[in-house]
């Protein structure tokens, strides 16, 4: 989770637990996390508690959900179709992304990388 979202949720520094493992940015630079926080994430009617590593780095995204959330939700994802499907109350729930928004995020990311700003992802996600 990026610091802008963390602050936007009115979460305080004292809400963070310790997290001492450095992360590797998209540009290969090391980023020291601010800490770790567990928050409930709702997708449709499903709610899953997710641990977020909070970083002070630029990103066009507000947070990145990775394997623990995907596994907890029993998600099947398609990056080609920008959607995920998951079992929900005896049916199939679906979250659909936006191709236009994905393109905008890519353009913003490339522009900021060319300015030397750091984008972060956990090393474990690689």
Image (tube, grey):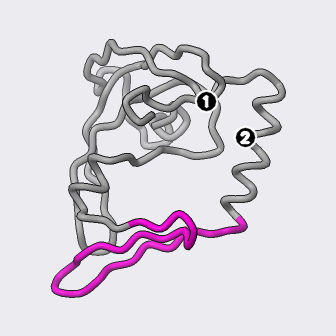
Secondary structure under tag 1 reads: loop
Q: Residue furthest bottom?
A: 91
Judged left or right of residue 49, residue 53 is right
Nearer to us in this view, 7 or 89 = 89
Residue 45 position by quadrant: bottom left
Q: In this picture, is 123 found above or below 89?
A: above
Who's the residue at 38% across and 46% down the image? Answer: 66
In the image, residue 105 lies at what x, y percent? 70, 51
In the image, the segment drawn in magenta is 77-100
How packed mark 1 is, by other alpha carbons closer than 10 Å (few <14, some 14-19, many 20 or more), is some
Who's the residue at 78% across and 39% down the image? Answer: 110
What residue is pinned by disc 2? Answer: 109
In the image, residue 47 lies at what x, y percent? 23, 62
In the image, residue 13 lies at what x, y percent? 37, 22
Who's the residue at 54% across and 14% down the image? Answer: 30
In the image, residue 125 lies at what x, y percent? 41, 36
What residue is pinned by disc 1? Answer: 26
For the residues labelled 2 and 1, the Cα–Cα distance comes to 10 Å
Q: Mark 2 near mark 1, Cβ–Cβ under 8 Å?
A: yes
């Amino acid at each position: 989770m990026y610091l802008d979202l963390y602050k936007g949720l009115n979460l305080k520094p004292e809400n963070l637990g310790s997290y001492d493992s450095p992360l590797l940015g998209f540009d290969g630079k090391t980023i020291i996390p601010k800490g770790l926080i567990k928050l409930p994430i709702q997708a449709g009617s499903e709610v899953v508690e997710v641990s977020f590593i909070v970083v002070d780095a630029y990103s066009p995204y507000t947070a990145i959900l990775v394997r623990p959330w995907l596994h907890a939700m029993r998600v099947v994802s398609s990056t080609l179709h920008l959607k995920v499907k998951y079992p929900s109350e005896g049916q199939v729930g679906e979250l659909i992304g936006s191709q236009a928004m994905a393109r905008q995020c890519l353009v913003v990311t490339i522009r900021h990388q060319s300015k030397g700003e750091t984008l972060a992802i956990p090393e474990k996600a690689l």
